[in-house]
Image: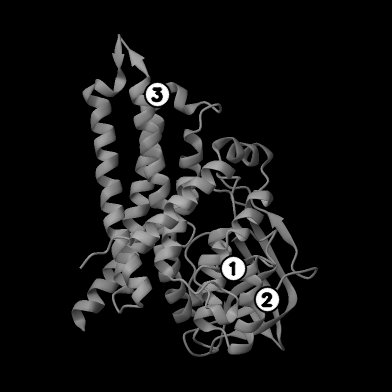
Amino acid sequence: MNFEFSEDQNLLREQARKFLQDNCPTTAVRRVLNAKAGHDADLWRKVIDMGWTATAIPEEFGGLGLGYLELCVIAEELGRAVAPVPFSSSVYLATEAILLAGSQAQKEKWLPKLAAGDVIGTFAMAEDAGRTSPKSLRTAVSGGRITGTKTPVPDAAIAGVAVVLARHDGGDGAALYLVELGADTPVTDVPMIDPTRGHGTLALNGAACEALGAPGAGWSLTQTLLNRAAVLMAWEQIGGSEAALEQARAYALGRYAFGRPIASYQAIKHKLANMYVKNTLARSNGYYGAWALNANAAELPVAAATARVSATQAYYFASKENIQTHGGMGYTWEFDCQFYYRRAKVLSVAIGSETQWQEKLISAIEQTRAA
């Protein structure tokens, strides 16, 4: 079986890469970082104009009706460019949650808006430090009103709608709700290691809400949603890790010490080789995850966890070794190595830590064997 992308998908990759090279150079990322703006509004509008937010949304809801393989390609290029846009929040999480659990009316209301970029979506799950579980949830719903605090919520300050995980008495102990954000959902900024990806504390002060999916099935739906998002986020991590390797290689070839390029020294060769090995493994697992997601295969829990773990490890390693390859210069504010390190750290915990996904992988393998 050939898991690699098709010719058309690779053409999409070339188009996406050229677009981001022109519209998201490292100078643009640095501008957002310095301003701690949370995202690049101009770039986001251009991404919307490219139709990327509509990629996997069916045509009947205003989307392009393509597929998850195309979305994986776009995710990789956004990761390569370290793009400061709310793509993962709105597309991987909010859009996917509505596609997964929304009623016909909810899909007709929200998916065209998300596809056209008229609204940004987000997913509010965590409430405090540590792991989220049905027992840890304090956010509650009564009489069609939701009350609680969610933190950190990605892109909370710019989102117009949130999918919120709340406590439910019965079923699996949780339920998902759609909340239109406004005056009764104030947001407080949460400083992150990567200021180009805004996060906030979302206060739900009795805001109106409506159930998304069956009440009491929220935890199960969340796990399915996270599996989908894990594959897409893995491809974003793969793109970032490849860019970090390319940056390290280019610097090593151009930096001379004792009359020769530092790339000729064995210690640097080993660094680059180890980065390449981890990146290659992550890409291989990413192909497996992309296939499982696109085919809605029963293997998705295993494939998603495998892709997530390997991509998280590869990106952190590549971003760290990229700084090391640059030596003392790599630690300075003027160099761009920091972009990949910052993004690697944020993505590593965005939908659960590496340890959590390792445990998910073990559980998924055990369930597969038991079946």
User: Can I make out residue 360 in this image?
Assistant: no
Residue 168: x percent and y percent?
A: 56, 85
Are discs 3 and 2 less than 8 Å apart at CB?
no
Mark 3 residue crowding within 10 angstroms, few (<14) / some (14–19) / many (20+): few
40 in relation to 122, above or below: above
Q: Are marks 2 and 1 in contact (CB under 8 Å)?
A: yes
Three-letter residue code for mark 2: Val
Q: Which picture quadrant has residue 220?
A: bottom left
Query: CA separation, marks 2 and 1?
Result: 10 Å
Disc number at residue 155? none
Q: Check disc 3 and report the residue beneath it.
A: 327
Q: Amino acid at mark 1?
A: Ala
Neighbour tally class for label 1: few under 14, some 14-19, many 20 plus, Cα within 10 Å: many
Q: Secondary structure at mark 2?
A: strand
Q: Which residue is mark 1?
A: 124
Q: Residue furthest right?
A: 183
State whether residue 277 is above or below residue 227: above
In the displayed structure, would residue 147 be above or below residue 247?
A: below
352 vs 334, nearest the viewer: 334
Q: Is residue 21 left or right of residue 228?
A: right
